Image (cartoon, coloured by chain):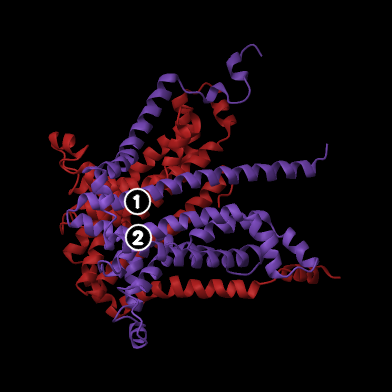
Chain colours: A red, B purple
Amino acid sequence: MPAHSLSKRRRKVLPGFGLSLGYTILYLSLIVLLPLSAAFIETAEMGIVGFWQAVTRPRVLAALRLSFGLSLIAAAINAVAGLLVAWVLSRYEFPGKKIVDAAIDLPFALPTAVAGIALTAVYAPQGWLGAPLGELGIKVAFAPPGILIALMFVGLPFAVRTVQPVMENLDSELEEAAAMLGATRLTTFRRVVLPVLLPSVLTGFAMSFARGVGEYGSVVFISGNMPMKTEIAPLLIVTQLEQYDFHAATAIAVVMLLLSFAILFVINMLQAWNSRRTGQSRA
Amino acid sequence: MPNVPPKLLSPGFSRAMRDPSWARWLLCALALLFLALLLLVPLLAVFAEAMRKGAGAFIESFANADARRAIYLTLLVAGISVPLNLVFGLAASWAVTKHDFPGKSLLVTLIDLPFSVSPVVSGLILVLVFGAHGWFGHYFSSIGVQVIFAVPGIVLATVFVTFPFVAREIIPAMEACGRDEEQAAVMLGANWWQILRHITLPNVRWALLYGVLLCNARAMGEFGAVSVVSGHIRGETNTVPLHVEILYNEYNFVAAFAMASLLAVLALITLVAKTALEWRIQHIEKQVVTERTRHRDPA
């Protein structure tokens, strides 16, 4: 039997291809692709001028600036903190380490509304941490720092969980070689360890940023929601929708969708870079 | 080798990777302090605020009809959305891992898409399609079905945001199992259902459970997307997270945090089960690896 017909038969040997693929594509189209396309078609109806006017109003620009700016800061803090936490969890032994490791995923598991009211209670002027900070003259809840803390909370697991596996699989020979050649620990970290970790740190940063820009539940309670000051972009979408201004709401949504697709693309590039650099593929 | 200090010759976890003890202490303390402030303090606050006026007030929060309706609705919505996404996850992973076709990686990327969409945007696009002024709004109202501001909309929003959860856990697990066992079963005359039941599903059962667990946690806790499509009709279209918001905005803090503590307990159970499953999956992976090396190298 010629080789190509053998491979053809082998490929067809498992049943259910048509049914499973057909169902997958149908369900995906109905639940995800059809509604997503609605946002873009609705925007196309507005025309490029209408779209531009909708997203350049001062209130919209202020909300987008606040959402993007604070998400960038939160992601940057998370990238550093995530590196620290991943380092401690993969290198050191201490009592209760397993519990700490499991607790990293709390922001994934805790519903955002619960995180929102809990953070507000803690950082409100009479709260456990809000009161001492208030005496120092720092207002956290109902001000931008409160939003920042909520965004750090929801983004932290991404920053830790992308770096941690890479660090655990780090080849110890590299560090041994560096030490043999007389490098100090700090130099080894800076010149040997950090370059290997860099793609995963950046991936965690991008994921944390993407999550922060779209975050709603944990932020609305602590932010105070004042237009032009502490109003985030997702909240502005909700406000416009409640006033039945579908065009304005959709225009902001499309800006956010385009941004998340761009980040998704960057994350894919980073992960390809990461698997090239560490020589292992990640699912 | 007299020139090499003897400490560098030690095997295993080498001295070269050991940091000075002051650095270890400092880094550990910093990391733990950061995690305590960011994660532990808010979690404790949920329970402290719920119990602020004593256990009596806490229990009373669950006694009224609106609270019970919210709990019922949350269970109902999760009970519909999770099985839907489970069936989808199985179909998608079967198609993607047991067959070859062009555009496969595009399909996998599209499955993950809802992860990168803001919850509020997810709700909004459903309003654009199913709302009163939406594409299919007229059709559904003409057959007497209200989607937006009603339970079907809440289910749709939940299905959307939890869409990739089961699929993305099963796909890598099924991929790792390969196709040999299924192909052997086909040769021996098994039909599709028999292959699924006796080979494929048992092989991926822990990954499947893991996906269902995460899917369920998100389905029960979803706030943003559900908030946009629910209409916030008290006692009718309020899930537990939405009820928390209503109570909180009415300054009924004890009741709000009591409902929230319910969700926090769910989150803690999810974390414990997740950790146990991860341990289980790693354990099985190790077994598979040792078995494979034994088969390859019969000593």
- Same chain for marks 2 and 1? yes
- Taking the image as shown, residue A158 lies to the left or right of residue B3, namely left
Vertical comparison of A142 with A184: above or below: below
Out of A170 and B282, give the one closest to the viewer. B282
Give the Cα separation between the discs numbered 2 and 1: 10 Å
Vertical comparison of B93 with B47: above or below: below
Q: Three-letter amino acid code at disc 1?
A: Leu
Chain hosting mark 1: B
**Residue A70 visible from this viewpoint:** no
- Taking the image as shown, residue B288 lies to the left or right of residue A264, namely right
Looking at the image, which residue is at 56% across and 38% down?
Answer: A169
Q: Secondary structure at mark 1?
A: helix
Q: Residue furthest right?
A: A1
- Residue tagged by mark 2? B71
Chain hosting mark 2: B
Q: Secondary structure at mark 2?
A: helix
| Rendered-image quadrant of the C terminus of chain B | top right
Tags 2 and 1 touching, CB below 8 Å = yes
Which is nearer the N-term, disc 2 or disc 1?
Answer: 2
| Rendered-image quadrant of the N terminus of chain B | top right
Relative image position of residue A201 (x, y in whole percent)? 44, 43
Relative image position of residue A127 (x, y in whole percent)? 19, 40
Q: Residues within 10 Å of mark 1 (few under 14, many from 20)?
A: some
Numbered label attached to residue B262: 1
Out of B74 and A270, give the one closest to the viewer. B74
**Residue B55 visible from this viewpoint:** yes
